[in-house]
Structure formats: structure tokens, C-alpha cells
Amino acid sequence: MNALDYVVLLAVLVGIAAYGMWATRGRQDLRTYLKGGNTHWLTIGLSVMATQASAITFLSTPGQGFESGLGFVQNYFGAPVALILIAAVFLPIYRRLNVYTAYEYLGRRFDAKTRLLGAGLFLVQRGLGAGITIYAPAIVLSTVMGWSMNATIICSGLLVIAYTVSGGTPAVNLTQKYQIAVIFVGMIAAFLVLLARLPAGLTFGDALSVAGGFHKLEAVDFSLNPDRRYTVWSGLLGGTFLALSYFGTDQSQVQRYLTGASLRESRLGLMFNAVFKIPMQFFILLLGVLVFVFYQFERPPVFFNASAWHRAARGEAGPKLRALEQDFDVAQAEKRRHLAAWIDARHAGDLPAAGAERAAAQAAHARTEADREQTRLALKAADPKAQTNDSDYVFVTFILSYLPHGLIGLLIAVFFAATFSSKAGELNALGATTTVDWYRHVIRRDADDARCVKASRWFTVLWGFVAIGFALFANLTENLIQATNIIGSIFYGVVLGLFLAAFFLKWIAGTAVFWAAIAAQVLVFVLYATLTISYLWYNFIGCAACLLFSMILQFFFPRTARSVAGDETRNPS
Amino acid sequence: RRVIFAGWIALLTLLTRCYS
């Protein structure tokens, strides 16, 4: 990074934040502060997209494409179906009741204790996740840029808190629109530079053939084998389930589409995501696949987290690591030679020669992959705490090594803009839920709008500092990052169960569903402690248990006048 | 009375078949 890069980086990040604060300055009532103004569908669509796409999306997803190819796109196959269900069923009810938070609906449909349970589960899960949103990109960027990690976390955290607290939901929506624009421009620019830097004579079709030769273009897998991580079926079933709970019941998303000027605007914003979510993820994965192709004709590092490799190479593992690097370079040169011969044979129409060269290139690739695996093991042996998954470092290494100055600053701004946009959405939702579902509902029932706005600002600051503290002081490793994903899956299922019971089980009342949710949550905790199944299954188990237990318990709890009065809110028209 | 996804699956299937 040179001076030009830093100017671009700071101008983009501070400029958008300052504009967001300036454009939403002045006094705001509670409705404007928490629900925004009359937002256009495109702003809603971009805001929903920006809240979901954190820096990890743009750092890790290209790395995923580099490492495993396009198969990860199947993870998003559930999104269109889930978003249609939310637009058709969830959204009209939320709007008709004019709620600030999704959990307010649980209070109308069931009772106060169920509302507090739903809000509490959200606050625990999202509050823990908020620290990761800041931490994950900070660890990668501070490592490759040589910045202080704590300074990176504190500076980026404070900037987000400043404009989120100052402007509330209108500022979050406005800044997200410009942040996602910067993200799109940056990623498209990186894609074009990557295409331009492919070897002369290598067409886009050749690049796809090379990627296909190394099994990077297997985008769909119709296999019924449950051991495979990403298949069309797991994407359609598990993905629908996950997307339904995330987009339909997570306040950080619900708050985005409740800002719509009308039901039509909110629905179109959701449909925008239903149409563009899969192509966006496909594009980011394809970018990673093309980075893979690019590195087949260059000299890639044997391990992309260069600072971790150099640190270990200075110790006892040095001779072994250097020997592996030497063998990797030899195998890589051999692979490059066979790939060039393969492309030439393809162009000449010499299919037998093309087949032989392709097989030789694949054999050389197996050798380079073995060297990479041995390097990981050597790094782990040298330091058991070392992170040996370097896929998060692939894209940022490519950017810093091959993009022109100015564009490097823009791409680093992309990672921070993505961090800010998802972080702001989370803090905004945490502040709103704490204010509406706890402060105004339990602590100060007589609080007027002005007092609630003030409380919401302070709660947003509080959650912002909780996130910064979690990122700074928790000893976060790969496993803890995964642990936060596990926390999400453990809570999401039960929360979705609460909402599905509210929408579709018309005869279930508050007391039954409250105790059913508690029992389901305990069951999930017990199963998590005793079973070794993938954490994704807990989404389904939590939801199914919540629904089943509530149906059983309803036979033992007589319906009260309060729960019957809630019936008017439950029927989706 | 008054959402392409199937088309995307078809395109991705075609891409997988052509390059594997």
C-alpha cells in the first residue's frame, strides 16, 4: 500500500460514514430512528444484501473458490424459496401490526414472556456474533498489512458506532447503499484486472477448461450422499431452513425491510435478493476460481499466510519448510509446462496429446497439493496454535501482489465497507431490540419517544463496545469463529420454531409455546453436548422440537383470554 | 394474483457437465 492507496481507503470509508451522519443529522422521532423513512425498494434490496455480506464474504468466498471450486454456491439455493415465503407470509403480518421488531409480533400473537424469550435469544446470539464481524477481517488484514490488530479493531469499531448511533436506521440504510456500490465496483475491477493478467493466448474458455481440469467448476452435485458437505438437496432443504430463520426472524434483517415506504417496496426489496443472491455468490466464487487459474501460470506461495510461514521458517521447522517450498516450486514449474502443452494441443485439435498433457498436469498438481498439506502439518507441529487454513489469505495476497496502486486501496476499502455494512446492521438491530422489547416493554413502560431514542443510542453504543471488547479480549481462533457459527445454529432453530408456530399453528397459545421453546433449547444443548453430528442439523432439530413440544403441551395448558385475543394477528391473508 | 432460480440451476448444471 502506498500513499495513493491510503488516500483512496480513507476517502471511501470516512467519506461514506461522514455523509451518512450529515445526511441524517437533526432530531429524529422513535419511528424514524428505528424504522427509517419511506425507503425505496432498491435501497432495501441493497441494504438486505449489505447486511448479510460481511468482509468474510469477500475474503473467504474467493478463497473457497480457489480451494474447492464453485460447489459452495449450492449453500444459497434455499434463499429464493425462503425469501418468497417471507414476502408472502411474514412481511404482511409484520407490516399490518406495524411492529418495530420481529419479537414484538411474538408478544402480540402469544404473550409477553414469549416475546422476551425470542428477543433474548436474538440478543445472545447476535451479540456474540457481532464481535466476529469485526474480528475476522481484522486478523487477516492486520496480518498481511502489518497493522496493529487491536488498532484495526478499535478504529473500525468506533467509526461504525459513530454513524450508527448518530443517524440510526436511516444512516445505516444510506451508508449501506454506498458501501455495497463500492463493493460491486471494487470486485468488478478486480475481476477485470484478473482477466487482463491471464497469460497471453489463454482465452476465457481455456481458463475455464484449466479450472475444470482441476475439478473447480463442479457447481452442482445431485448426489444423495449425506456425507457430502454441499449438494443441491442439502442446499434446497437446509438452505431454505437457514435462510427462513435468518431473513425472517433475525432483527438485523427484519429491520432492513420494515423500512419500506409500502408493502410493495419491502416485497420488491426481498425479491431483488431472491433474484441476485445466487449470481452474486457465483460471481465471487468464480473470481476465486480464476485466481486459482491465474496462479497456475505464476509462482504462488506454498502457504498464503506468508507472515505465519516466515515466522515458523525462522525456527526449528525452517529446513523442512524450505525443502517443501523447493519441491513445491519444482512441481509447480512442471505443472506450468504441461498446462501450456495441454492448451497448445487443444488449440491444434490434437486430442490424444491434450489428454496426456492434462493427465500429467493433474499428477503435478497432486504433488503441489501434497506439498501444501505437508507444509500445513509442519506449521502445526511448530506451533500447535497456528492457523493452518490459508484460504482466507488467497484473495488479499493476489490483490496486494498484482493489482495497481489505487485499486489496492479500493479493494482494501471493499473489505472494510463490507465489515461496516454488516456491523452497522447488527448494532442497529441490537439497539432497537434492547430498546423496544426490554427497555420500553419491561424497564420504563412510560418512556416517551424522546427518551426511547436516547436509550436506543446508548444501547447501540453499549453493544458496539461489547463487540469491540469481544474481538479484542477473546482469544479467537479458527475454532472459536466456528463456535460462533455453532451458537447461531443452536439458537436459530428454536427461534424459527416460535415464529412458525405463531404463523401456522393457529390453536397454539403463549404458555405452551414458551415452555416448548425452553424445552427444545435444553434438548438442543444436551444433543450438542452428546452427539457429533454437523451443527447445521441443530437448526432443524431445534425448530422441529419446538413445534412438536408446543403441540403436545397445548393439550395440558388451557387457552387463556389473552391468548385468544392474540388470534386476530395470526392469519396471513 | 399479481423469481429465474430454476434457470440458474440449469446453467450451473450445464457448466458442471461441460467442464468436468
Image: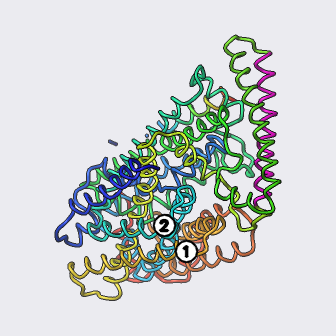
* Contact between labelled residues 1 and 2, with CB atoms less than 8 Å apart: yes
Q: Against A380, is A447 above or below?
A: below
Kindly identify the residue that appears in the image at 47 percent across and 33 percent down.
Answer: A192
Chain at numbered mark 2: A
Same chain shared by disc 2 and disc 1: yes
Residue A519's quadrant in the figure? bottom right
Q: Is residue A329 visible?
A: yes
In front of the other: A166 or A270? A166
Residue A422 vs residue A2, the one in the foreground: A2
A178 on left or right of A233: left
In the foreground, A472 or A529? A472
Disc 1 crowd rating (10 Å Cα; few below 14, some 14-19, many 20+) is many
Q: Amino acid at mark 1?
A: Ser
Region rendered in magenta: A353-379
Q: Is residue A49 visible?
A: no
Residue A56, position in %: x, y? 53, 55
Q: Which mark is residue A505?
A: 2
Residue that label 1 marks: A550
Quarter-of-image position of residue A25: bottom left
